[in-house]
Image (cartoon, grey):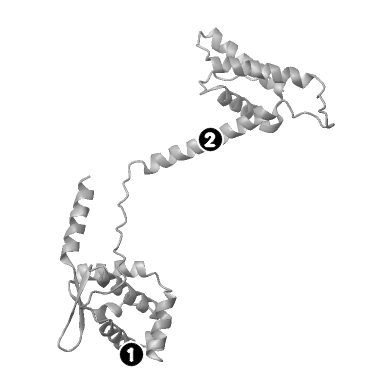
């Protein structure tokens, strides 16, 4: 193996130095040529001494451990009482080096993540009230009738009209389109337009699964009173954004912008 010449780097500890030597020699942690590595390790300590650098005690302890392993490697392997050979003298050191290497790689990964995300602040997710029932003044039959009218008008939702109530119940159970996404969509429409007919909101659905998701999202928003519902003399359902919630959200947004 050719003689190494390397710059005198500063290492965090003896395991860090040993990993650097193993990498420079391109050898396996679990099959360390202990004689060469031991000699190079001691050469590094001598260079530190020649440059009047203070050598930490842990480096000296590791040098002694390497010499002990080196001497044990020169002796015949002792046999235990059950006839098997004792563990390789390098095994314990190899395990410590492997563990240190994993820790060092993890530290580098998290340091990189911190560089990317360290200055960011995540807005906490708003938790919706999980009350199970609609407010007493909300008649769900009005909402169902609105959805049926939309389904009858538009061929995209034609299948939903067949055997109406049973079909609707089946579709509600399926929840193919995420309801959470439609909650956001309904709130965006109401923030932009103000009061809006429920049927107009339903008409934004791309397919019948989305139609059901909008219906379920509307029920959830009504339950937690994020929106209000009024009914015209002609029976049309109108949704109105709950302005008290909107004002609180606006204050949160302003506060996050100023921070």
Q: Residue at x 55, y 7 (%)?
A: 50
- Name the residue furthest left: 233
Secondary structure beneath label 1: helix
Crowding at dot 2, Cα within 10 Å, few <14 / some 14-19 / many 20+, comes out as few
Q: In this figure, which residue is indicated by the disc labeled 2?
A: 103
Residue 54 position (above or below residue 176): above
Give the quarter of the image for residue 248: bottom left
Q: In which quadrant will I find the C terminus?
A: top left
Question: Could you say where residue 23 lies in the image, as x and y percent from the top left?
Answer: 62, 30
Q: Earlier in the sequence, mark 2 or mark 1?
A: 2
- Which label belongs to residue 152? 1
**Residue 96 higher or lower than 216, as above or below:** above
Q: Residue at x 70, y 17 (%)?
A: 68
Horizontal placement of 180 versus 227: left or right? right
**Residue 152 drawn above or below residue 5:** below
Q: Is residue 28 visible?
A: no
Mark 1 burial class by Cα count in 10 Å: few <14, some 14-19, many 20+: some
Instruction: Residue 206 in the image: state x and y as whole percent.
Output: 37, 77
The reply, left or right, for residue 93 in relation to residue 254 is: right
Spatial separation of the CA atoms under disc 2 and disc 1: 63 Å
């Amino acid at each position: 193996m050719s003689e190494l010449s390397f710059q005198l780097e500063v290492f965090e500890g003896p395991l860090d130095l040993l990993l650097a030597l193993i990498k420079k020699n391109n050898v396996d942690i679990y099959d360390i040529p202990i004689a060469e590595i031991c000699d190079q390790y001691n050469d590094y300590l001598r260079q530190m001494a020649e440059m009047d650098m203070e050598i930490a005690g842990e480096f000296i302890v590791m040098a002694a451990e390497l010499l002990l392993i080196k001497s044990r490697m020169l002796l015949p392997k002792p046999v235990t009482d059950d006839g098997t050979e004792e563990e390789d003298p390098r095994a314990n050191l190899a395990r410590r080096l492997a563990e240190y290497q994993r820790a060092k790689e993890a530290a580098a990964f998290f340091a990189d993540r911190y560089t990317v995300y360290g200055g960011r602040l995540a807005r906490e997710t708003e938790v919706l009230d999980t009350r199970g029932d609609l407010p007493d003044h909300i008649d769900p039959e009005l909402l169902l009738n609105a959805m049926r009218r939309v389904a009858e008008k538009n061929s995209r939702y034609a299948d939903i009209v067949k055997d109406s109530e049973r079909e609707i119940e089946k579709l509600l159970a399926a929840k193919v389109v995420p309801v959470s996404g439609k909650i956001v969509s309904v709130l965006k429409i109401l923030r932009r337009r103000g009061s809006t007919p429920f049927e107009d909101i339903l008409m934004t659905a791309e397919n019948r699964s989305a139609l059901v998701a909008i219906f379920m999202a509307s029920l959830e928003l009504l339950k937690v009173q994020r929106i209000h519902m009024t009914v015209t003399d002609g029976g049309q359902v109108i949704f109105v954004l709950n302005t008290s919630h909107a004002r609180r959200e606006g204050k949160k947004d302003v506060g996050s912008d100023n921070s």
